[in-house]
Amino acid sequence: MTFLYTRTNTWSSAPQPTEDTIKAWKHISQKKNWRIVQLPNGFLQTEYRDIDDPEKWIDVTRRETIGGAEQAIDSSIEHYAKKLEFTNGPKVVKTFE
């Protein structure tokens, strides 16, 4: 007779984000910490303010249009906002009685 043993991970056993990571996600998910700059080659670069050094900007993406650059920022904000939703545990989508 063969038994199959599987191991599953629960939320409590999965790697949890650190407080520094959560702080960074909160910072990046605020639009006021972003900007768009034009590069010498004509492309537009999206950047967010460094959380530790407000004078420093960290480049993220390059786009050809201002609309594309703003959409990239909005998508990044949405991405990190979703990550923050799950810092309190998994989201219940349906329960049964």
Image: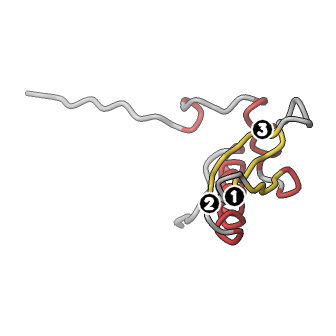
Instruction: Give x and y (percent) for residue 20.
Output: 78, 29
Q: Outermost residue toward the bottom?
A: 67
Ranked by sequence position, the earlier of labels 1 and 2 is 1
Quick one: 24 or 90, which is closer to the camera?
24
Instruction: Give x and y (percent) for residue 27.
Output: 82, 44
The residue identified by callout 3 is 24
- Separation of disc 1 and disc 2 at Cα? 5 Å
Left/right of residue 81 with respect to residue 31 in the rendered view: left
Left/right of residue 8 with respect to residue 63 in the rendered view: left
The answer to whether the residues at label 1 and label 2 have Cβ atoms under 8 Å apart is: yes
Residue type at mark 1?
A: Leu
- Separation of disc 3 and disc 2 at Cα? 24 Å
Residue type at mark 2?
A: Arg
Q: Which residue does the image show at 72% across and 65% down from the upper left?
A: 70
SS for callout 1: strand
The residue identified by callout 1 is 44
